[in-house]
Image: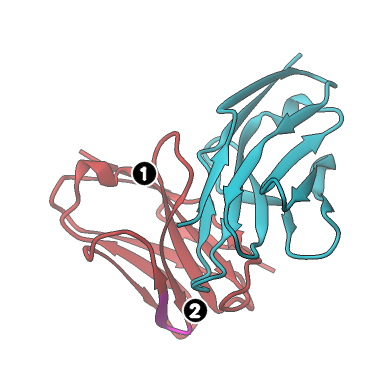
């Protein structure tokens, strides 16, 4: 069964510093990959997605991610974070084998941006 | 273009009771998925409905059931509530089966006491 591992449960960083949130998935088949952000008491907002094509994906709010098939990773990066980026971030992978439309989520990474 | 709306936003139920959560999909979307997000966890897939039929189901017992209506809105029903059912329930709609362009609602926070 597919799984997603977010390697850091919490990432503290100072404002204007760069950040990387790490995500690995377990799958030997083609997948779609996603990063979502969740602000307190809200639903999920899509940051970016990889479906095919260029392995460097740019998303909203200055975030980008790189798909690495050989390492089965999809790490999220931002060159300079803001206080407003403080939130929970989820990496997710599609279930294309069964085509149920199911997304498999990681446990989440809390990004805490300090002034 | 309206997004996904869920109701109610918060709910408190007693163990053993039944609950119905509602979701209105985004305009133009015919597929609805439901997720359960326990505190401090990632969302877990419950099931998906496409054109009023269940398209896929996660590892949830039969007391979790759903419906999708002709206007593509959806309900999640949970019978015989247990304390572990306390969670944020998220609804997501997409333009079609196999299309992963999901729009998520803000969720319903269910507390079982």
Image position, residue B110 (x, y; %): 33, 46
In which quadrant will I find the C terminus of chain A?
A: top right
Looking at the rendering, which quadrant does residue B1 occupy? bottom right
Looking at the rendering, which quadrant does residue A87 occupy? top right
Question: Which residue is tagged 1?
Answer: B87
Task: Count residues near mark 1 (Cα–Cα under 10 Å), then give few for <14, some for 14-19, many for 20+.
Answer: many
Q: Nearer the viewer, residue A22 or B7?
A: A22
- Name the colour scheme: by chain
Q: Which mark is residue B72?
A: 2
Looking at the rendering, which quadrant does residue A38 occupy? top right
Chain A, colour shown: cyan
Identify the chain of the residue marked 1, using the numbered disc in the image.
Answer: B
Q: Residue at x 60, y 76 (%)?
A: B29
Task: Count residues near mark 2 (Cα–Cα under 10 Å), then give few for <14, some for 14-19, many for 20+.
Answer: many
The answer to whether A32 is drawn above or below residue A35 in the figure is: below
- Residue found farthest to the top: A115
The answer to whether A15 is drawn above or below residue A65 in the figure is: above
Secondary structure under badge 1?
Answer: strand
**Marks 1,2: beta carbons within 8 A:** no
Q: Are marks 1 and 2 on the same chain?
A: yes
Estimate the spatial distance between the alpha carbons at disc 1 and disc 2, rounded to whole Å. 24 Å
Q: Earlier in the sequence, mark 1 or mark 2?
A: 2
Q: Nearer the viewer, residue A100 or A38?
A: A100
Predominant SS of the magenta segment: strand
Report whether A108 appears left or right of B36: right
Image position, residue B52 (x, y; %): 42, 83
Chain B, colour shown: red
Q: Residue at x 59, y 48 (%)?
A: A25
Secondary structure under badge 2?
Answer: loop
Which region is colored magenta?
B51-55
In which quadrant will I find the N terminus of chain A?
A: bottom left
């Amino acid at each position: 069964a597919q799984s997603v591992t977010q390697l850091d449960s919490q990432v503290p960083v100072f404002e204007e510093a760069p950040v990387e949130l790490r995500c690995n998935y377990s799958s030997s088949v083609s997948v779609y990959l996603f990063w979502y952000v969740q602000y307190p008491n809200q639903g999920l907002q899509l940051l970016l997605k990889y479906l095919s094509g260029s392995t460097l994906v740019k998303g909203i709010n200055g975030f980008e991610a790189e798909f690495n098939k050989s390492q089965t990773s999809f790490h999220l990066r931002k060159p300079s974070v803001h206080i407003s980026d403080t939130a929970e971030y989820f990496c997710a992978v599609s279930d294309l084998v069964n085509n149920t439309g199911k997304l498999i989520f990681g446990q989440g990474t809390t990004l805490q941006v300090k002034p | 273009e309206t997004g996904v709306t869920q109701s109610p936003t918060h709910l408190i139920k007693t163990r053993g009771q039944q609950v119905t959560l509602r979701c209105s999909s985004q305009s133009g979307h015919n597929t609805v998925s439901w997720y359960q997000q326990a505190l401090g966890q990632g969302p877990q897939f419950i099931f998906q409905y496409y054109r009023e039929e269940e398209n896929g189901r996660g590892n949830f017992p039969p007391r979790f059931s759903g419906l999708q209506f002709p206007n593509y809105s959806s309900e999640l029903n949970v019978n015989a509530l247990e304390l572990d059912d306390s969670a944020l329930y998220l609804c997501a709609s997409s333009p079609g089966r196999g299309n992963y362009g999901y729009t998520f609602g803000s969720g319903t926070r269910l507390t079982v006491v």
